[in-house]
Image (cartoon, helix red, strand yellow):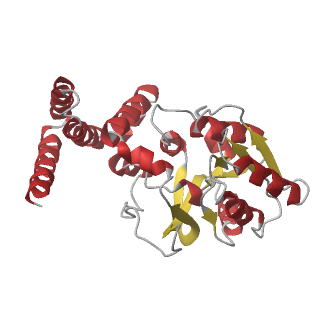
Amino acid sequence: MAARNHEQYVADAAASVLEQDYDLLELIAVDDASDDATPDVLERCAAAAPPGRMRFVRHERQEGIAETRAHALSLARGEFVGLLDSDDLWLPGKLGPQVELLSAEPDVGLLHAEFEAFDSDTGLPIPWGSRDWDRDADQLVELVRLGCFIMPGTTLIRREAIERRGVGFVNPGYPSYDDYLLFLTIALDWRIAHEPRTVMRYRRHPGNLTNVLFSGNLARARANLLEGFLCRFPEARERLGGERRRTLAHLLVAAAAHNPRRDRLKSVRWALEGFRHHPPAALNEAGRVTRVLLGARKS
């Protein structure tokens, strides 16, 4: 559990882990130099937990979510690793069936499931995200084509799958994309499995890290991450086939459209690069962007 400035939520988050009906579980919570009472709350949770059930560490200065997750992972002793942000909740019974599946299917490196987003003020469910990826397709291709459709808090990950390529949780230069990079890397060697159970509640509130993620040029950030991934693991290119060029074309044209007032020359360069990758995909994205802009002007 990576924690920062969630004093009003973190006790519930910790309890949702500690109350799982699975005995061989240790919650490792790392506070990333919170400005509020989050570390005090976590310290009380750790003191009240059964011996060996929870470990709490605090950073003296803010390091970032990737570095905080990496620190927690370095302290973990388990064969399987789960993630939960300090404002979200695991549902009862999340863990046991996931451990059983990973134990029974050694080729599965990562298991993920369904989640429910909810409004923090009202507690009511709200729609969030698309769940329309192809379950039967190559999951590496789907992760490139659609982006990170895996909700980290629903996952259970084989420790060996994290360590095989030596990537783990690293900062890719954009907030909270450390999990996306890890999932892409795991998909190189392992099967990614999905279960239809809802195992987590995702809290929506003004302080969500995803608000920071979506406030920037997300298309450019995703293109950068994919280009870095493919440079590091060129063997993925053949497996991705034409999807690599199609996706990069879409992302680069979308990034150019997001950027025009800041640096027109850079925007033109990105758009031309997109057309070089895959002209039909770039043209399709340009048409989509134009329709969105025209619709916005009319409204």
Q: Is 179 placed above or below 22 here?
A: above
What is the quadrant of residue 22 in the picture? bottom right
Q: Residue furthest right?
A: 51
Q: In this view, does 21 lie to the left or right of 156?
A: right
Residue 214 in view here: yes
Nearer the observer, 8 or 114? 8
Could you tell me which quadrant the C terminus lies in? bottom left
Q: In this view, does 193 lie to the left or right of 32?
A: left
Q: Is residue 191 left or right of residue 128?
A: right
Q: Residue furthest front?
A: 36
Residue 163 in view here: no
What is the quadrant of residue 53 in the picture? bottom right
Kindly identify the residue that appears in the image at 63 percent across and 46 percent down: 4
Q: Residue 259: x percent and y percent?
A: 23, 35
Kindly identify the residue that appears in the image at 50 percent across and 43 percent down: 176
Q: Is residue 297 left or right of residue 70?
A: left
Kindly identify the residue that appears in the image at 43 percent across and 50 percent down: 211
Q: Residue 255: x percent and y percent?
A: 25, 38
Kindly identify the residue that appears in the image at 40 percent across and 64 percent down: 131
Q: Is 72 placed above or below 202 here?
A: above
Total marks in image:
0
Q: Residue 113: x percent and y percent?
A: 54, 64
Nearer the observer, 24 or 210? 210
Nearer the observer, 79 or 11? 11
Q: Residue 252: x percent and y percent?
A: 24, 36
Nearer the observer, 192 or 52? 52
Q: Is 67 placed above or below 78 here?
A: above
